[in-house]
Amino acid sequence: MRKLEIKKFLANNAVSILFVVIGVLGLRVSGLSLPFFLEDIVNRLARNSFMVLSLIIPVLAGLGLNFAIVLGAMAGQAAIIVVTHWKIPGISGILLSVLLAFPIAVLLGILTGRLLNRARGKEMITTLILGFFANGIYQLVFLLLVGSVIPMKNDVLVLSSGVGLRTSIDLTGGLKNGMDDLIRIPFPISAVIIGILLSGVYLFKYFFQKGTVRIGKLLGMGILGLFLVGWGAFHVYTHSMFNFVRVPVGTFLIVLGLCLFITFFTRTKLGQDMRTVGQDRHIAEVAGIDSDRVRIIAMVMSTVLASIGQIIFLQNLGTFSTYGSHEQAGMFAIAALLIGGASVAKATIGQALLGTLLFHTMFIVSPLAGRTLFGDAQLGEFFRAFVAYGIIGLSLALHSWKKQMLAREEARRSV
Amino acid sequence: MQYDNKKSQATVILEPILKTIRSFGIPRIIIILFLVSLWFSAAFLSIPFPALLYDTLIRLGMNTVLTLSMLPSILVGTSLFFGLPLGIICGLLGGVMSIELNLKGLTAFFAAIGFSIPLAILVGYGYGLLLNRVKGSEMTVGTYVGFAFVSLMSFGWVTLPFKNPEMAWAIGKGIRVTVSLEGRFSNVLNKLWAFEIYGIKIPTGALVFMGVLCLIVWLFLRTRVGLAMQECGMNPKFAKASGIDVDRMRILGTIISTILGAIGILTYAQGFGFLQLYEAPMYMGFIAAAAILIGGATLKTAKISHVIVGTFLFQGILVVALPVANTVATLGSLAEISRIIVSNGIILYALAQKGGNE
Amino acid sequence: MEGNGQIVLEMKNISKEYYGNKVLKGINLSVHKGEIHGIVGENGAGKSTLMNILFGMSVIHSTGGFEGSIEFLGKPVTISSPFDAMALGIGMVHQEFMLIPGYSVTENIKLNRETTKENVISRILGPGLQTLDWKSMGQDAKKALARLEMHIDEWAKVAGLPVGHMQFVEIARELDKEHIKLLVFDEPTAVLTETEADTLLSALRRLSENGISILFITHRLHEIMEVCQRITVLRDGVQVASKLKSETTIEELAQLMVGHSIEYMGKRKVNLTERKTILKIRDLKVLMPGETVQKVDLDIKEGEIFGIGGLAGQGKIGIANGVMGLYDSYGSVEFEGKEISINNPREVLKRGLALLSEDRRGVGLLLDMSVEMNIIAPAVEIQRKFLKKFGFFSLLDRSQIRSFALDMIQKLDIRCLSPDQPVKRLSGGNQQKVCIAKALALEPKLLFVSEPTRGIDIGAKKRVLDTLVELNQKNGMTIVLTSSELAELRSICDRIAIISEGRVMGILDPDAEDAQFGLLMAGEYAVR
């Protein structure tokens, strides 16, 4: 029984486990020091988690992986360009860009949702192509129309010809780290806080929401929490390098807020309707749920969240490629989600966060590992791209294959 | 009975008219209008027309075979062939081998094709097996398998033991990102039997080559196996009930598409003058898909005429857009941007039509 | 209780036409409070149309509505959508479950009727964001299940439940709707085992004791006799009888259900005992969803027209599909004394069998292709006909194809503009003729014909049947005709096998008594 359970666990989490192994091996080969790695990974988690989380809701509504979060990313990016042009720095600039991006994202979300209602059963490929298409429109606007049709005078942002934006935009002195720098706490102290929170949450769940947490998990999480507290407390009083890793707590609080919102949302009437539509549209409609509307709402939510996600992403990065950043955002977020163990039909907050962690670990170590192993950092980069594309292809294929097998099984079982 | 007759009479008259309108469709009308208006503006800006037409013909010869690779895939029911990068890479490998063996001219070109076909058969077979397991999601899976294969092959280009210094980086290892075909098989088809008429140069060899391939596919579709393949695409249940092994046919269709992709990229490369390696093949599938859709194909039906007409219209726009844009203003990227918008727009349009499952 | 309570539902003089085809003629139906009212009839007798009218389904309204009136609790009502019916207190327990397997029993019972609580966010952003009140939902579910005396864990996932329990979840959902007054059960026992069916029947009785009226649609006559107080029999859209249970017997119901509609045209009684067996089927099992064949043994004689009848979903359709290899099958099939490997359509076709599929548009035709290509496609594939050799490859022979197609069009009277016309433009009857032509191009020795007249008009029906008889008599082709219409089978077949629950219930002569057919179809063994 026990053995079977372990086997099942391994089979269900094969992808994540593989990436844990790759990450750990890569870390050893790359020769990175732990504090250095932590600094990078903490930053990247703050940067990308929100974006990855924005993918969950469409999965819930049965729309699959929303490659069209690229559109949300564009909305966010457009807002950032405007705010940078207006030279509004820091957190106020960030808030303003969120506000500016909001109506654009809502509009794009509605359009995407309506398109998807026309392209039933072909949602994923449609969002994928829609991303490419929107990229063309985006380039048209920012490369050709800005400066020629849309008046904009700004020597820093606009190309010397006066038409079109430069290919990369620096946010230093503007939005850069506007959110991250609100509160920064050294890593050991953060570890103490997380440790307390972790054990606290599980204790609460164990005693007040009976049946949701088993004693084994409680003990595991409790021990992990205590370890974090102990480790953190120890390091606070040393001169270890860990104290120089400063965690952008403000950003993480926003991410936490989104996690809470998603959890809350799945327990609402609308969230339940979304799940129902995702499980079986026909039954949902017979029960009186307007599935088209629910799907549009899901797309709007995802697009809006992605626009915020991109703003968080870019303020953390501090510089971006005007015509490329959004493109990568979508693909990397999806790859991260899948690495966390999610599938086309199921995605959880835990999977999103774990996936972000594992994906970025691979991201950090693969060029370095490539250099050490093959004497060529570029090979590591190829590997990175291969993994991102491969994991998406693989999980799409597995999902479709599983569906086919299930249908066959169903036919056999109905006999 | 009378009622029946009346109805059929009405349909006799209306049918052809409706059919033409339907087969054209709104996006095609827009594209034709766009092309015509580009031509007019080209004339207005006194851009030499023969040069434009020559360019269009060259591009037609370069791109038609790539577009043709969509056809077997659509007909056999695996939808648009977004796995095209797989075929392209086979073709590129063939090209690289031919250079490695120091071949020149037409021999080099046909040797490259000869080398790439067995590879394409192998790769197409494997890809076909995969597609049979992901029925209904061929396009999404195909896209990402194609992308993944491209990045995997990037390893290959760096590590494969090709020695010819023409292809190598000046420093470092591996093959260059673009390998020049100058003195190899650059323009071999374009120059073959080329002649000039009314000031317009005709790249006869390229057009004949593309015509022969189209003819071969056209004939194939009229054989027993070709018919069986089309039955699979139109109605797999019908095919099964007629004793056809649908899965095998799908593999066959995929192999043919892959082979055409390999030949297609070599034809493209001879006109372009370079082999483009590494990430270059990634988005070529979308361009070829857009071309056949512009020609009038759907996700489920396609004809040879769609291939040729579509490639002509699409490449025509790209050829004319560039000089027109450059004359109007220095909007260097207009051609590139309109390529992105037109190609993805037409694919979106096809996806949003009723019917057909992904 | 019989007929003395308050009248809950009264449907008066209901008639319905589909495209000039009368499918219901002046039906009167009344259901009293707490009554269990049975409705029996063959497929196509009009049961489902009647229910579609009661539930205001869009298929009724998009085809011109219906004639007659409906009264509910003594008041005339218009029901223009299923939601109107729901609001009145009419519920339906579907034959195919409307359950989400991944959801718990409670979630399924409360589907789109979840109880919610307000919260801070919902006050700002609207009621869509109210949180679900799991506790009260669970209680409701428990209560509804308790009314059925079912003890299912209300938090269990539906996916793991036995089929019988799923049915109860479905019923509980209807019961949970407030003011439910009338429940319609559409063939509820079809998927249940015998004991599960018994539990269901006693649940029905309990509901009726609680004052809920029930319309019980089934073809299992003994179940009807067990629980119903009154029974309405439909046949060909006509209400042939409405009887109190005490006034009737199973045999009478069976007879009423089948009835006499077409005379046997059997002018050609043949002596079958002298003929040799051309097709021998042993232990055939076919995994065709919805039409499973459990275990069938049949001997088809050379040159006969053999009929296979039975109600929908009982497996009669599966036999031909199984032999032809279209669905996974087990067992042995001998053709002309030699074993043929089933699950291999190609070999079966090569041996000279062919199938005219019941799913004309789905399996039988390439809708976008021309008439002529449809006709010749299988013959090209199987027999390499219609090909012309050019050196080392062969191409389709256009002129040979055209002349064959024209010949068929003339012989079978296929109405089309030209052999080039796509078949999707043809009428149902003409499409069927294209299918026949397709089978003829293969020149089969034995032809399976499944539901050849389904969905085609009466004139065309007769022509299709005449063609079959002609093929049989002139060309000596053995024909196995599968049909839901008993009258059709009896008009041209030499023998008729009745299939129920995936088995042969009995083989009858076409002129056997109605009651015998009826009983076999209802799954009751005939009194020999």
Image (spheres, grey):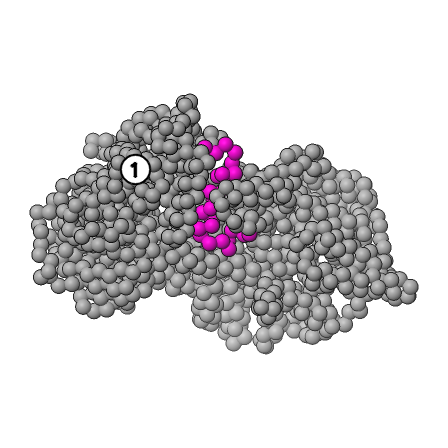
Q: Is residue A57 above or below residue A215?
A: above
Residue that appears at 30% across and 55% down: C502
Residue A243 vs residue A232, the one in the foreground: A232
Would residue B156 appear left or right of A364 to someone viewing this image? left
Based on the picture, tell me whether residue B33 belongs to the magenta stretch. no
The chain ID associated with circle 1 is: C
Q: Whole-percent x and y of residue C336?
A: 18, 66
Q: Position of residue B329 (x, y in %)?
A: 64, 42
Residue at the spot 24% in from the left edge and 52% down from the top edge: C525
In the depicted view, which residue is nearer to us: B53 or A189?
A189
Left or right of C67, for residue B126: right
- Place of residue A228 in the rendered image (x, y in percent of width and height, measured from the top left): 80, 62
- Residue at the spot x=44%, y=61% of the render? B132
In this orientation, does residue B18 appear? no
Q: Main secondary structure of the magenta part?
A: helix
State the residue position of label 1: C245
- In magenta stretch: residue C158: yes
| Residue A202 drawn above or below residue C171 | below
The amino acid at mark 1 is: Lys
Residue A95 picture quarter:
top right
User: Which x, y percent locates residue B102?
Assistant: 52, 75
What residue appears at the point 20 percent right and 69 percent down from the top-left corner?
C338
Q: Nearer the viewer, residue C292 or C39?
A: C39
Q: Secondary structure at mark 1?
A: helix
Q: Residues within 10 Å of mark 1 (few under 14, many from 20)?
A: some
Residue, far top: C75
Name above or below for residue A71 compared with residue A397.
above
Residue range (magenta): C156-181
Q: How many marks?
A: 1
- Above-or-below relation of B352 to C285: above
Point out the image quarter for the N terminus of chain C.
top left
